[in-house]
Image (cartoon, rainbow, N blue to C red):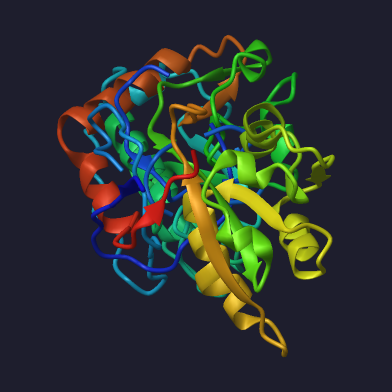
Amino acid sequence: MKVLRLFALSGLAIALVACTGPAATPTAAPASPTAAAPTATAAATPTDDPSASPTAAPTASPSEAPSASPTEAPTASPSPSPLGGVCGPIESVALKNPGRLTLSTDNPAFPPWWGGDPAEQYPNEPAGGSGWETSDPYSMMGYESATAYAIAAAMGFGPELVDWIPNANFENAFAPGDKAFDFHMAQISITEERAQAVDFTDPYFEANQALIALTPNAITAATTLAELKEFRLGAARTTTSLDLIEDVIVPNVEPRALPNNANALRALQNDQIDGLVVDLSTAFFMRDAQLENYDTPEPESTIVGQFSTELQADPVGAVLQLDSALTDCVNLALAQIQADGTLDAIYEEWIVSDQAVPFLE
């Protein structure tokens, strides 16, 4: 049985959501809400949702519960230049709000992609809090939060010049139309269909999809794709997780398309589905944080297996408005933090994986 091991680092819990390329990026079995996605350990929500090195071509590989500690000091972001960054003086950068970088992610935002305590007042956060649930992007904790701040720093924007706006509906981020954000990060897989409506940056992560189930359930004994065909499978709609069920597994039972990962997890708990597909990182978070805390009888769960990127590639990128003048600039900043090792360090801090997860083939 082929198994992939992720070697992680320091961090906290695992998270949620699913997602989905050109540049070498970290791969995880971590990682989305995303309907399309990477290869490493740990991340979920709709999953399209999320091990390799962020700066090297991803290899099918996650395998351990990512962990991000909300109370742990975040990785230091590169210091921005007082004159600007890779795109020149910040005054020359085309922004939604001149002089300030407006970023966005889904709310709630889950570990290991995001960290921090929503009840805590972080530096540079609007007074009185900002309405975030589960995690807080202003904490600079978690893989995507730390990556966003590192990109901002490379562009010349310090934390005091970064604002965050929440997105309540996963699909809105890549729907056609004007965007209120400069760029959005939420484990969103890069797909041709989505790229018709928005711009994507080069990938900053690549994740594996995974299958989680409650124990006991006969599906937990499955080791091949063929054995999964007779079971009731589900995933968040408009995610690459659902695409994998429909296009790769091709079950004999109509799969359930749920509004989001929270609803999908509820369907699993209520025995409406036998197995739930999310990115690997999200699977770890669901198993070790969410399902662990349910009322009695406490359901036991298991990650049945993961799916290699050979079955479905899931590169994850930041989203910008279609034909944004900022896309090239963000790509330059991303290339810089990949080249100088910053992205690798962030990956090692927040995407953890030490557990072997078998591949379903």
Q: Residue at x 56, y 34 (%)?
A: 188
Viewer-proximal residue among 247 and 80: 247
Tell me residue 99's x, y (percent). 45, 31
| The quadrant where residue 63 appears | bottom left
Tell me residue 163's x, y (percent). 52, 45
Left/right of residue 28 with respect to residue 273 in the rendered view: left
Q: Residue at x 53, y 40 (%)?
A: 187
Picture layout, residue 21 above or below residue 11? above
Picture layout, residue 329 above or below residue 216? above
Residue 287 visible, this orientation = yes
Q: Residue at x 54, y 73 (%)?
A: 289
Tell me residue 224's x, y (percent). 54, 44
Q: Residue at x 82, y 45 (%)?
A: 256
Viewer-proximal residue among 201 and 139: 201
Residue 133 visible, this orientation = no
| The quadrant where residue 108 appears | bottom right
**Residue placed furthest toward the left:** 340
Tell me residue 185's x, y (percent). 52, 38
Viewer-proximal residue among 203 and 179: 203
| The quadrant where residue 119 appears | bottom right
